[in-house]
Amino acid sequence: MFGGPKIKFDKDLLERCERVSKAAGYASVEEFVQHVLERELDKLDKGGADEEEIRKRMQGLGYIS
């Protein structure tokens, strides 16, 4: 499914994704991660958030420093 760049995950986060994706009935962890990312990106896009607002949200979530 992911033919492009690779993304590294913390071991604990990957284990959580594996557990949740299986419980939710996803065919793979990749399918689950893609769905979650698409859903979150849609929220940000539809919210009319500008780059600065997105950066602050991502920083608050610990994705960027």
Image (cartoon, rainbow, N blue to C red):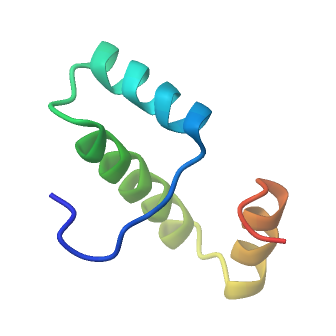
**Identity of the residue furthest to the front in this view:** 11
Image quadrant of residue 6?
bottom left
Q: Which quarter of the image is occupied by the N terminus?
A: bottom left
Q: In this view, does 19 lie above or below 52?
A: above
Residue 40: give x, y in percent of width and height.
Answer: 49, 55
**Identity of the residue furthest to the bottom in this view:** 51
- Residue sitting at x 79%, y 56%: 62
Residue 13: give x, y in percent of width and height.
Answer: 57, 36
Is residue 8 shown left or right of residue 1?
right
Is residue 22 shown left or right of residue 19?
left
Image quadrant of residue 17?
top left
**Identity of the residue furthest to the top in this view:** 23
Total labels: the figure holds: 0
Is residue 3 shown left or right of residue 13?
left
- Residue sitting at x 48%, y 28%: 15
Residue 27: give x, y in percent of width and height.
Answer: 15, 31
Residue 31 vs residue 57, the one in the foreground: 31
- Residue sitting at x 67%, y 84%: 50
Residue 2 vs residue 55, the one in the foreground: 2
Q: Is residue 8 above or below residue 5?
A: above
Q: Which quarter of the image is occupied by the C terminus?
A: bottom right
Residue 43: give x, y in percent of width and height.
Answer: 51, 58
- Residue sitting at x 69%, y 74%: 54
Is residue 61 shown left or right of residue 46?
right
